Structure formats: C-alpha cells, structure tokens
Image: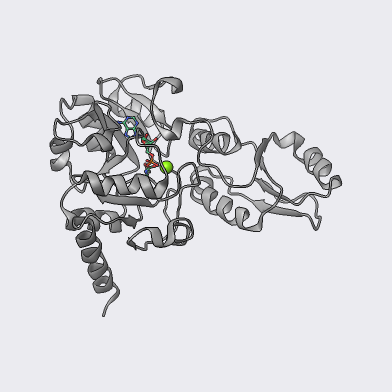
Amino acid sequence: MSHINIIATDIQKAASLLKLGKLVAFPTETVYGLGADASNPSAVTKIFAVKKRPADHPVIVHLGHLNQLTHWAQNISSAALKLAKHFWPGPLTLILPKAANVAEIITGGQNTIGIRIPSHPIAQALLKSFGSGIAAPSANRFGQLSPTSATHVQADLGTDIDMVLEGDTCTIGIESTIVDISSGIAHILRPGAITAAQISQVLQQPVYYLDRSSVRAPGMLLKHYAPRTKLEIVPAVLLKQKINTLLTQDLKIAVMARHPANFVHPNLKWHMMPTIASEYAHALYAYLHAIDMENPAIILVEAVPVDEEWMAISDRLQKASA
Ligand code: TXA
Ligand code: MG
C-alpha cells in the first residue's frame, strides 16, 4: 500500500471514530489538537474530562471550508470575513457571534464562538472527510505544554484517547493567534504567528490587545503553557552571573540561549536556540518537552527581543515562568 493510501485509510478511520463520539488527536500547523464532533455535546464533554479542563473554558471549532462558517457563527462582519478570506486556512482563530444551535459546552456559556480553518494537510483531509466542525483544544492536559509531535500527545494523553493521527512536527509550533472580531473591531486575545501588524494591514484598521482580566480563555491564565520544570527568563547580560550562582549551589541547570555556550560544566546543559523568531517558535515546545524529561532543577531562558515578531514567543515564555 502506498503512503497516500495508508493516510487515506487512517483519515477515514479517524472520521468514523469522530462520528461515533470518540476522541481523535490530529496535527495542525500550530500544535496538535484533541478533536471531537463539535455537534455532539457528550463527545465534547469527553475532551474536558481527558484534559481535566474546567467546563467554562470554550473550545475552538475547526472547519474544512469557509462555506461551513454560517452553521457555527452569525452576524459575521465584513472585517471578520476579510480576515477569514485572507488568513484561512492558517494559524488564526476568529472569535465570532455564535449561531443559535451551538452547544453550550463549546462556548463555555458565552455568546461567541472560536473558529479556525487549519492548513495542515492531515487536518484538512480529516475535516473534509468528516464534513462538519471538529471541536479541538490543544492535545495536552490542562495547563501543560502544547504538543507539537504525535509522540508528545502519546506521552501526555496515551490510552485516554481513541486515536492519534500522526503528522510531521507542527511547522509553526505555537498556538494560533486568537482575534476577537465579534464586534467588528479586532482585539487580539492571544498573540501567535500572525501578528497585529499583519491583521491591521489587512483590515486597514487599528488592532487592539484585549485586557486579559476580562476574558475567559485558559490561555489567558497566568500559569499556562508550562513545563514541569521551573523556568526563569534572564536578560542576556545577567545570564552568566545567574548560571554561576546556581552552579555553586550544585544545581543541575538547562539553558536556552540564542548564542553559543560561553562555558562548560557537568551540571550545565546548554541549548542553542534559533535566532530567527519563526524557527524559535517551531522549536520551543519540543525543547521544553525534552528538557522536562532530563529533569533539571531549573531552565534559564535568555530573554528574547522586544519586537513584534517575538511577541508570541515572549508571551508563552512569560506564562511558562509564572
Ligand atoms: O493553535 C491552536 O489554536 C490550537 C489548535 C489545536 O487549533 N488550539 C488551541 O486550543 O490552542 P486551546 O483550547 O488550547 O486554546 C484555545 C483558546 C483558549 O484560550 C480558549 O479559551 C479560547 O481559545 N477561546 C475559544 N473560544 C473562545 C471564545 N468564544 N471566546 C474567547 N476565547 C475563546
Ligand atoms: Mg491549550
């Protein structure tokens, strides 16, 4: 059987499992999602049980095609449609007024819904085969790191789910940009690979960052996207001094820096991170997952540039260090 056929069989199997109300993890270009039939509230409820996620946190509904949008959302503004047409399929989630029939478990009781059309070929194939909306948060336990490979999903959720569709590692590697455009004005709820400047450029309108305290989104909780190991962000100029202090305390430390190691020590594991933001994002969770397995006392991360293209990374690092 050819590679394509094997994938086609897996996709069909995954789509039938979803129809039966089962849980299927699948790759997207951002991170792996834990999918359930978005039209089946009891299937969606299982996601919350497996993730140990509080029931009032809404989940994103993934679609295969723009023509399904009005089944899930209504009063779609021209600004929202512009973003949808420009960035989908892609790493963007739009918060829109929900359609009347959407189950409460999807929206966490809010009157809005998060929608995304992902571009990953396996996600696309699954969504096309399934033919309707797939509710999917990231495929990790609540508050943990998002998975960027099938191995991460297996390690975290293992036998609690019915199937993992395997794809390559996620090209983007951090979660989608979330834009609340339910009022017609764009507010960024979670920064991602698509930047405020890109959104503003498409809309020809200013874009705002929403006051975090007013939104109900788990990604907004201070401690989220966190490795098990304590993580500290250290300005580049203080890194060496900080490392020295910890080494004198006989602690095992991991360093994630954007420059080569400037000294060697048996208790020090130096990880040279990419200097390009998109490459750094792609690698970030894989490094954190791998470092967690080595179980150091602390991860020191060299602070990243204060720059729009580093903003999503800086956001995840800050949450991981909270
Ligand atoms: O890249 C991604 O967005 C991945 C892939 C699988 O699509 N999904 C993801 O889902 O990161 P999750 O559940 O881990 O994070 C989605 C965020 C949550 O913070 C959730 O609260 C927020 O989206 N969200 C979903 N619907 C919302 C709504 N109606 N209003 C405000 N926030 C919403
Ligand atoms: Mg998540």
Residue extending furthest toward the bottom: 1
Which residue appears at 35% of the width and 19% of the height?
Answer: 206
Asked if 80 appears above or below 183 in the picture, the reply is: below
Q: Going by the image, does 124 lie left or right of 291?
A: left
Asked if 275 appears above or below 98 in the picture, the reply is: below
Q: Toward which corner of the image does residue 112 lie, by quadrant?
A: top left
Q: Quadrant of the C terminus?
A: top right
Q: Relative to the observer, which residue lies in front, 261 or 26?
A: 26
User: What colouring method underlies this structural image?
Assistant: one colour
Asked if 257 appears above or below 121 in the picture, the reply is: above
Task: Say whether residue 4 is visible.
Answer: yes
Q: Going by the image, does 246 lie left or right of 171?
A: right
Residue extending furthest toward the right: 248
Q: Going by the image, does 274 lie left or right of 208?
A: right
Where is residue 63 shown, x and y percent of the image? Answer: 22, 45
In terms of image quarters, where does ligand 2 lie?
top left
Q: Going by the image, does 157 lie left or right of 92?
A: right
Which residue appears at 45% of the width and 43% of the height?
Answer: 142
Q: Quadrant of the N terminus?
A: bottom left
Task: Say whether residue 114 is visible.
Answer: no
Where is residue 157 shown, x and y percent of the image? Answer: 43, 56
Where is residue 273 shown, x and y percent of the image? Answer: 61, 49
Q: Relative to the observer, which residue lies in front, 268 or 105?
A: 105
Which residue appears at 81% of the width and 38% of the height?
Answer: 241
Q: Relative to the observer, which residue lies in front, 222 or 1?
A: 222
Q: How many marks?
A: 0
Q: Toward which corner of the image does residue 52 lie, by quadrant?
A: top left
